[in-house]
């Protein structure tokens, strides 16, 4: 069960997507034990894949670092229940172009 409020750390998602992420996290915590972070992540990921198309990644835990490339408008990091963190993002194959509008191709090795 979701105890307390979700605290959103970083996001570039639309408000409705943020709300869906928090609601799905609440449902996952109702369905799975808080210590079963893999099943919580799987549940959220599959629902976002269904709602917003494939390619979503979800990381759930109490202590982790990350460095990811994501599609614009498809990133949220929030905590629930005080200490359980959730990182949800849609992966991107390449970094978004810089503000100059240039994308430098990377040659394959």
Image (cartoon, helix red, strand yellow):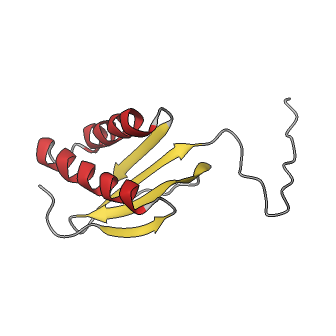
Q: Is residue 74 visible?
A: yes
**Quadrant in the rendering for residue 93:** top right
In front of the other: 96 or 65: 96
Q: Is residue 81 above or below residue 105?
A: below
Residue drawn at (31%, 52%), measured in percent from left and top?
20
Q: Give the percent coordinates (x, y) of residue 46.
A: 35, 34
Give percent across and percent down for residue 13. Answer: 47, 59
Q: Nearer the viewer, residue 16 or 9?
A: 16
The reply, left or right, for residue 81 in relation to residue 74 is left
For image coordinates 71% across by 43% down, the residue present is 94
Above-or-below relation of 64 to 44: below
Q: Quadrant of the N terminus?
A: bottom left
Residue farthest along the top direction in this orientation = 109
- Mark yes or no: residue 34 visible: no
| Apparent side of residue 2 relative to residue 57 in the rendered image (left or right) | left
- Compared with 6, 55 (above or below) is above
What residue is drawn where x is 12% and y is 48%? 30
Q: Which part of the image, by quadrant, shows the C terminus? A: top right
Which residue is at a point 86% across and 41% down the rendered structure image? 105
Residue 22: x and y in percent read 29, 57
Please name whichever residue, 47 or 2, is drawn nearer the observer in this view of the structure. Answer: 47
> x, y percentage for residue 48?
38, 40
Q: How many marks?
A: 0
Up the image or down, 57 lies above or below 20; here it is above
Q: Quadrant of residue 19?
A: bottom left
């Amino acid at each position: 069960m979701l105890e307390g409020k979700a605290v959103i750390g970083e996001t570039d998602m639309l408000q409705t997507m943020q709300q869906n992420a928090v609601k799905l996290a609440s449902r996952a915590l109702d369905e799975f034990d808080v210590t079963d972070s893999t099943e919580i992540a799987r549940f959220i990921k599959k629902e976002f894949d269904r709602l917003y198309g494939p390619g979503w990644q979800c990381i759930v835990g109490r202590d982790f670092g990350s460095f990811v490339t994501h599609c614009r408008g498809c990133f949220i990091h929030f905590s629930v229940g005080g200490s359980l963190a959730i990182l949800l993002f849609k992966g991107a194959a390449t970094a978004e172009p810089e503000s100059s509008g240039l994308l430098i191709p990377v040659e394959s090795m």
